[in-house]
């Protein structure tokens, strides 16, 4: 009875070619092998990082691929050796693995794991399972996994070290956002920047990630949160979530960092870049105060040369750090889900649209055009 041990045929969105819409296809999803889990994805949303891989300017993309790394679902079956999960468990697949053996997993200083470091470019990590094969086939072709998650398929197979078990009563149509966007921004503020009560903050880029960083700054007790975006339509949500000031660099007659320095009597305590690109990176550094200014980089602009920095900008006491998935991992994500249920933060403001999964290309367009924050796609 049931599907255990059998190939499942289901719908998935396949990226066959860069620069082309995703194609909704019937895919075959093989049963999970050792230490793998097959999941039915119930809801998924789209993060800016999904769009990079199918951008024709991104030369390293591995195609065809099933993208999606912000999903939540239910365990359908488990492979040999899986002890922590059983069919029916609610789960969030994470692109951040936790092997528990490497020097990073054994350190409290990072959520990084050596299982996430086979390639130089994180966007092509975990493209196959450990036996170097894929569990997805479509029209006789093997399809790459994406970041070990591939949530743009109704069923997906992930390693047990990439899976967080969450509360049975979790609302999957909301907590899918904990799979990337929310956790990334919120954690960048509270885990990585370690925003302090009464501090001043600047957040660049007000997408799902940046707005979540604002939630983090607010939760940490920041007294002033300056929100920066080149799209004025993002400001209403930023204010609703706790931003005290909103700036559009395109509407200023001097660099935004100069305006922030003037507004804050010498610069903010914490700045978080959730947009990416050398210009924003530079503004992130320059808008912080000398002495103790803390700069946290989250945004990625894959086609950009990044930041050039002189020691003078650092020796007066600024610190720079990067942040990946907000410092969370499979062990800490379940607590985030409980915190959401207990009203510690609200995910509602991040959901701008809800669409059936078949409308995934519409959802991608909304994100690219800056018209959405997060679109929840329901299978
Ligand atoms: P998004 O496209 O929804 O939001 C980006 C926002 O930045 C938009 O509102 C833009 O208008 C705004 N923006 C663009 N250029 C500028 C500029 N020059 N100045 C100010 N604002 C600007 O993306 P998102 O929220 O899904 O993701 C944000 C970034 O974070 C993106 O680069 C993504 O790849 C990265 C990311 N990083 C991690 C990580 O772990 N480090 C995880 C997830 C996403
Ligand atoms: Zn993401």
Image: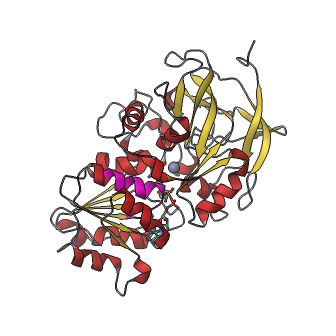
For the C terminus, the image quarter is: top right
- Near-viewer residue (141 or 190): 190
Q: Residue at x 33, y 62 (%)?
A: 243
In the image, residue 369 sits, relative to residue 119, either above or below, namely below
Q: Residue at x 58, y 20 (%)?
A: 88
In the image, residue 348 sits, relative to residue 282, either above or below, namely above
Question: In the image, is 200 to the left or to the right of 377?
Answer: left
In the image, residue 41 sits, relative to residue 259, either above or below, namely above
Question: In the image, is 108 to the left or to the right of 132?
Answer: left
* Image x and y of residue 302, in percent: 53, 62
Q: Is residue 211 magenta?
A: yes
Residue furthest to the bottom: 253
* Image x and y of residue 15, in percent: 72, 51
In the image, residue 48 sits, relative to residue 41, either above or below, namely below
For the N terminus, the image quarter is: top right
Q: Quadrant of residue 327?
A: top left
Query: Magenta-highlighted stretch: main secondary structure?
Result: helix
Q: Residue at x 29, y 47 (%)?
A: 190
- Near-viewer residue (29 or 180): 180
* Image x and y of residue 156, in percent: 65, 33
* Image x and y of residue 251, in percent: 42, 83
Residue furthest to the right: 139
Q: Does residue 231 appear in this view?
A: no
Which contiguous range is marked in magenta?
Answer: 204-216
Q: Is residue 213 magenta?
A: yes
Q: How is the image coloured?
A: secondary structure
């Amino acid at each position: 009875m049931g599907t255990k041990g059998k190939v499942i045929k289901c719908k998935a969105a396949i990226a066959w070619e860069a620069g082309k819409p995703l194609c909704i296809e019937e895919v075959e999803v093989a049963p999970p092998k050792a230490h793998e889990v097959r999941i039915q994805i119930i809801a998924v949303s789209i993060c800016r990082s999904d769009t990079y891989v199918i951008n024709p300017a991104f030369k390293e993309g591995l195609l065809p691929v099933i993208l999606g790394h912000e999903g939540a679902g239910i365990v359908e079956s488990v492979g040999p050796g899986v002890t922590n999960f059983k069919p029916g468990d609610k789960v969030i697949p994470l692109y951040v693995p936790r092997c528990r053996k490497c020097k990073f997993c054994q350190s409290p200083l990072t959520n990084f794991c050596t299982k996430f470091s086979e390639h130089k470019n994180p966007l092509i990590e975990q493209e196959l399972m450990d036996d170097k094969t894929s569990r997805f086939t479509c029209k006789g072709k093997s399809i790459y996994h994406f970041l070990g998650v591939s949530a743009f398929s109704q069923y997906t197979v992930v390693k047990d070290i990439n899976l967080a078990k969450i509360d049975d009563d979790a609302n999957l149509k909301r907590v899918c956002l904990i799979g990337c966007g929310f956790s990334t921004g919120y954690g960048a503020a509270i885990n990585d920047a370690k925003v302090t009560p009464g501090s001043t903050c600047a957040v660049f880029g007000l997408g799902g990630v940046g707005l979540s960083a604002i939630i983090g700054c607010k939760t940490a007790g920041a007294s002033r949160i300056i929100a920066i975006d080149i799209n004025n339509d993002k400001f209403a949500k930023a204010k609703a979530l706790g931003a005290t000031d909103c700036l559009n660099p395109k509407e200023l007659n001097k660099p935004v960092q100069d305006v922030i320095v003037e507004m804050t009597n010498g610069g903010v305590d914490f700045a978080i870049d959730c947009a990416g690109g050398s210009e924003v990176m530079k503004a992130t550094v320059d808008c912080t105060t000398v002495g103790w200014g803390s700069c946290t980089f989250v945004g990625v602009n894959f086609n950009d040369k990044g930041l050039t920095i002189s020691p003078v900008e650092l020796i007066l006491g600024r610190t720079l750090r990067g942040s990946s998935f907000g410092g969370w991992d499979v062990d800490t994500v379940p607590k985030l889900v409980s915190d959401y249920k207990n009203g510690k933060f609200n995910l509602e403001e991040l959901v701008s649209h809800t669409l059936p999964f078949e409308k995934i290309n519409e959802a991608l367009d909304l994100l690219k055009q800056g018209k959405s924050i997060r679109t929840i796609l329901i299978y």
